[in-house]
Image (cartoon, rainbow, N blue to C red):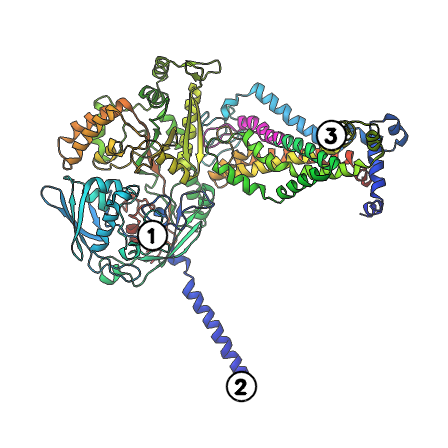
Amino acid sequence: MNARTVLFVLLAVVVASFSFTAMAQDVAREDTAIFDRDGRVGPQPGFDNYNPYVPNNLSNGGLGQAVFQPLFILNYETGEIIPWLGESASSNDSLDVWTLNLREGAEWSDGEALDSDDVVFTFEMLGNPENAGLWRAGNVQTWVDSVEAVDATTIQFNLKAPNPRFQLDFLTVKIGGNILILPEHVWADQDPFTFKNFPPVGSGPYTLTHADETNWIYDRNDDWWGAKTGALSMPEPLRLIWIITGNDQIRTTLAVNNEVDSIMDVTLGAFEAMQAQNDNIFAWVDGMPFVWLDPCPRQLTFQTDVEPWDNPDMRWAINHIVDRDNIIEVAYEGVTIPSRTMFVEYGAMFPFIDAIEDAGMGLSSTSNHMAAEELLTANGYVRGGDGLWQDADGHVLNLAIQVHEGFIEKRRITSVLVEQLRAFGVNASAAVIAGPTWDDNKRFGNYEATTDWDACGSVNEPWASLDRYTSRHYVPIGERSSGNNHARWSGMNNEAYSDVVAQIGSLPLGDPEVIPLVLEAYQYFYEDLPILPLNQATKLIPFNSTYWEGWPTSDNNFNHPATWWHSTHQIISELRKAGM
Amino acid sequence: MADSSGSGGKPVADLDSRFSNLAPSSTGRKKTGRFNRFDNPLLNWKFLSGAGIFGFIFFLIFLGNQFWDTDLALAGSSPLNMPPVGFTNWRDQEGIPEHPLGTENSGRDMLALLIVGTPRTIGVGVIAASVGMGAGILLGFMAGFVGGIVDDVIRLMTDVVIPIPSLLVLIVIQSALQREMDLVTMALLISMFSWAAPTRYIRSQVLSMRESGYVQMAQLSGVPTRDIMYREMMPNLLPYLAASYIGNMTGAILQAVGLELLGLGPQRIPSLGVTIFFSIEAAALLRNMWWWWGIPTVILAVVFIALLLINLGLDEIANPRLRKAN
């Protein structure tokens, strides 16, 4: 071998090793599915927070879509419950003992077995009274008396009272996400309030490769238990990426250039611009209004523990000023409908909504300035020289509405609300606040009013939304709430309401007694109006089929299109390479 | 260049001639004579055209306020996404005369937005520059004239503040504020950083002026320090102060627009920067809504050009060397 050959061989080895590393590290664009995530570009306080039970985690940034798996997923289109990590769940006849069966052979991404001990650990962590501030812990502590492992894959839940909705409310992705089972061997010695779980150990088909303040990259685990056991199918994308794009301009550009496959939510105008420039972009409905009805209607939540908003008359006055039709026309460019009640306008909810409306408790979609004027005057307010309402001491009636900066939709609702209120003489203002602060302010009661979606919960029965405002969730201002009743609604009406809601909670789904009880409870709510339901939330969720096909649409309706929910496991498993 | 290096050999003499020329003594001015026609600000074409543009903008704003309904600048006051008259939008809607410059996607009328937003944008600059210059004059004179420990402390403060990346700090402060941002707050925040540079420049001018004859004479005559600083020396610095006031104003507007483009500006009644932020957020570029981002951008550019011309003009009035170059 002469020197030249040696040199050539060496060179070939070097080139080969480089291309090998390139193969190991780079995944081709056509093997990567890229998801956009709401939020402002900039420092993300929780960019490495993979703890599902504390605020500001990556629940919609891969934690719930790639790393952790849900037990069951509710199919919005058929109403059936799809088994995922769980195989089945059933109750005894009296509905107070539930049994969960896990899939056989489930494993954590570090190779440890996922078994009933992990489920027991998770529920016991949430059931510990010291951990009441954790996400979902309040509900677990209300309902679950004890949890026991029957065998490696069977878990028995002994409830404090009969609960017909236990599987739906505790084990199933109904809205957003639900209790995620944690690996006991990782979490056992950690403080669940401060543990970041970074890098995360989960049971999903992907593991975290990279996380920074705008990008989260997950690579497929080819040794994933779901495919090994045949229980679940191996998803096709080799890599999943979540990115924060920030605004419609960037989203639209990326989507038009095929640099992102799924977009969280855009305005109608931005969607039309995308479609005009890229034939592969589509949404849930093929044609106007393109949108999917999100189960979390938008509302104005009052802080009912501070003056003057502790007075139901004042909240009602604001309700009379608000013109819901105008909010929809301006903030949504016409693509949604007003809320009549606190509930989402899904078919399964119509019996309750219609009954409430027939009983005269539906909310008007237009304003009634005369009624507002009467209420304000009756409470000692007069219009000052500048047209602003003021109380007997000359204090102008202010209403500062806090809004999460990350969501264009909520900012737009708020800006229309502010104009409506100011036009009537209420000195309203919008405070655009960083997400984590906004969340903290709600939990500790540090706000006057806020635009949110807190009545969210019911999709096929009324209890879940009603329960969020019961007295058991009440905490005084300054104490951290469990995530419910941020309005801090209390008093006699609330007590009576809570009693009736508790009765509803013990009745099986579809029981004929439910409707009259809902009417009774709603009457107290309607009198006090701690929140103003505003409008139904629509999401215009664009997908791009250039690289991946099989996205959910009203025609391909295997489930809904909310890609920021934990049910996204199902969407990812349906994706197929384009043109294959 | 040759000119400046030539005169650079005797800076003190040069400065002296410059300031004696500007001294309020009318006899001195008559004797030198050479620069008289430049001393009258009205005869400098840069200053004149800049001021003219500025005046014209304010004239238009005045007319707009008289003849246009400025409440149309509020969300939901007009139909959405309308193009200017004579154009069509992506939905093939034609512009209507009720909204001659079109509307944006929250139903704000563009013409009303400009009438309301332009003075607000300029207002931030005026407030921030006034506060910054006020502090700069006070501190700069004290440092330059009083000297000693006062000078050391003030110089240390400016040395600390000048290298701070103010935009970064402002972003942090504004995102932490938990209420609606208003223009005055924004201007005051900006002025927290806009005093340091004027302080340093004024100090250096005062230092060189302190040695001039009329100041020494005033000192010998027992004129109080305050009067020497503000009655004797400051009038000589007026053109210079005016030039740097305008420069400061430009800087403040730039910073305000920068913050607004990041979404940290007042949102209810938008200024020009916030209008552009809304347009970016709503993908106006891809929606071909050029009137939404384009018109405010052009107005901002015109405002900056006018300020630049005024600044250059004032600079020439204040600095004889620049005049020679012309």
Q: Amino acid at mark 3?
A: Leu
Would residue A147 be found to the left or right of residue A292 on screen? left
Looking at the image, the residue that sits furthest to the right is B31
Other residues around mark 1 within 10 Å, as few (<14) / some (14–19) / many (≥20): some
Residue displayed at 55% across by 84% down: A3
Which region is colored magenta? B102-127
Q: Quadrant of residue A300?
A: top left
Q: CA distance from mark 1 to mark 3?
A: 64 Å
Viewer-proximal residue among B36 and A400: A400
Q: Which residue is mark 3?
A: B48
Asked whether residue B154 is in view, the answer is yes
Q: Chain of mark 2?
A: A
* Image position of A163 with respect to B49: above or below: below
Label 2: state its secondary structure.
Answer: loop
Q: Is residue B118 magenta?
A: yes
Marks 2 and 3, how far apart in space?
A: 81 Å
